[in-house]
Image (tube, rainbow, N blue to C red):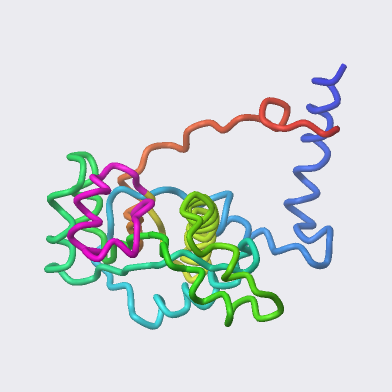
Amino acid sequence: CFQMFLDFFHLFYNPMIEHYPQLNKNMLSKLNLDILFNEARSHKAWLNKEVTNDQINQIYNLLKFAPTSGNCCPARFTFLKTKEAKNRLKPFLDLGNIDKSMDAPCVVIISYDTEFYEFLPILSPHNDAKSGFIGKESRIKNTAQFNSTLQGGYFIMASRSVGLDCCPMLGFNKEKLNQEFFGDGKFQSLFICGIGYGDKSKIYDRAPRLDFIDACSII
């Protein structure tokens, strides 16, 4: 019975979305949802087209509004555009990530600042949030990693929203990358992400995703 309901729901609802994409006046248009979600892909090959510094600024000025615990904003973003900068990254990449990184117009290192709490008097001025982190290494690490990962997700959505494609990656030697780019140990890398204009002729068909019933519950 439930499956019959789902079949009926999709049969009835999908045409409504197609013809009336903004059932809620605050909902994004179908075109915008396609850009951010429905048609967005992780690209492994790139067109030879520059990512501009203006676009990079636009990305940050969107993602900076991501929610973080106590507005701690611990993520840091290092944009590698030049051939020289990307060549510094190359020795630490897994073999499968070399071409997709080296050919990308820009590769971004998403990391966290181990001293993010130093900015809390500015970011969270209504209380003494900084004192709650000083000397508490476990709390610093857990807070920084969780919130920086959250900001990294917003980075992907912000990049898509300014017309760029993304390729987030984990396959690299974090310890050696950190030594090369963050020698003082203050920043710790989480993942890297190529951004640019993906070559749509070189991607596979989209892989399936879990259905709502397999991934979600309403209690």
Q: Between residues 113 and 30, which one lies in front from this camera angle? A: 113
Quadrant placement of the C terminus: top right
Magenta residues (range) = 169-192
Q: Residue at x 60, y 63 (%)?
A: 132
Q: Between residues 64 and 208, which one lies in front from this camera angle? A: 64
* Residue 31 placement, left or right of 113: right
**Occupied quadrant, residue 84:** bottom left
Whether the magenta-drawn stretch holds residue 52 is answered as no
What is the count of numbered marks? Answer: 0
* Residue 23 placement, left or right of 122: right
Give the residue furthest to the front. Answer: 135
Residue 32 at x, y percent in the picture: 62, 63
Above or below 178: residue 161 = below
Q: Residue at x 39, y 75 (%)?
A: 56
Q: Between residues 138 and 165, which one lies in front from this camera angle? A: 138
**Occupied quadrant, residue 170:** top left
Whether the magenta-drawn stretch holds residue 172 is answered as yes
Q: Residue at x 67, y 58 (%)?
A: 30
Q: Between residues 83 and 114, which one lies in front from this camera angle? A: 114
Residue 166 at x, y percent in the picture: 40, 56
Residue 99 at x, y percent in the picture: 19, 49
Residue 79 visible somewhere in the drawing: yes
Q: Residue at x 18, y 57 (%)?
A: 89
Give the residue furthest to the top. Answer: 1
Residue 197 visible somewhere in the drawing: no
Residue 206 at x, y percent in the picture: 47, 38
* Residue 35 placement, left or right of 194: right
Quadrant placement of the N terminus: top right
